[in-house]
Image: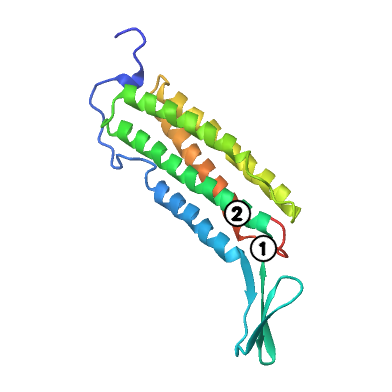
Amino acid sequence: MRSGLRASDYSHPVQPNPDPKPGRWILPVVILAMMGFAWLFINAAEDPTVSAGVTTTTLDGTGATTTTLGSATTTTTALPSDVVQYNLDITAGGIEMATLQERMGELNSNWDSRSASYADTLAGLRALDADINSWRTGLNSITVPTSLPEYANFHTIMLAAADEIPARSADVLAGLQAPDSGEARRAALIQFNEAVTAYGNQVNTIAAYKPGDAEL
């Protein structure tokens, strides 16, 4: 055997895998969740209380739009502008992570099916790991709303969840290079997907939050 040959480099026949792309099924679920919190954000931007029988519309001194409904009213209170921008920013970050996660799944699936070489997979995972770390750094530039103080705590929780993702990405990269038959890499990939899901759940929860709700 050549010096430095890894177990993952072996060319002997492998047993057929009933799922040649393990973990791939997780991706659509998480991507849908990421798209879902964009919808939640849009709906969180206004909090209407609706009754029937519209007759007139006025604007009161608080900035809320009041529609007179005979004997009832509908009041729609918009979120502060800094909260709106914050929700847009965290939504963009979540969607970017969904794309990075899809790349992770494809790289691992292609290696499992041997439709990509070891060298190409290693290079791809290294580039992806660098992009994931850049993504995490980019989250630090998001401006936390000051109009609603609870968002500072929300943001801290979200960043803690985001911190797990680069760590698990590094584990996947190390797993590819491990002297085993792929067990370390596959276990790390499961943990990576779990970390992305946990982060996505935090973003979903923040985007769905409306002032007056119990804090997260």
Q: Is mark 2 on a helix, strand or loop?
A: helix
Instruction: Judge the density around disc 1: few (<14), some (14-19), many (≥20) Cα neighbours within 10 Å.
Output: some
In terms of image quadrants, where is residue 72?
bottom right
Residue drawn at x 70%, y 64% is 213
Find disc 2 in the rendering and name its residue: 87
> Looking at the image, which is closer to me, 62 or 50?
62
Find disc 1 in the rendering and name its residue: 79
Instruction: Judge the density around disc 2: few (<14), some (14-19), many (≥20) Cα neighbours within 10 Å.
Output: many
Q: Are marks 1 and 2 in contact (CB under 8 Å)?
A: yes
Question: Could you tell me residue 142's position as x and y percent?
Answer: 63, 44
Amino acid type, label 2: Asn
Quadrant, the C terminus:
bottom right
Mark on residue 165? none
CA–CA distance in space, label 1 to label 2: 10 Å
Specify which label sits upstream in the sequence, 1 or 2: 1
Quadrant, the N terminus:
top left
Residue drawn at x 33%, y 37% is 109
Is residue 52 found left or right of 216 in the rendered image?
A: left
Amino acid type, label 1: Leu
Question: Could you tell me residue 12's position as x and y percent?
Answer: 24, 22
Is residue 159 found left or right of 8 in the rendered image?
A: right
Q: Is residue 202 above or below residue 213?
A: above
Question: Could you tell me residue 177's position as x and y percent?
Answer: 41, 21
Is residue 59 found left or right of 26 in the rendered image?
A: right
Question: Could you tell me residue 208's position as x and y percent?
Answer: 60, 60
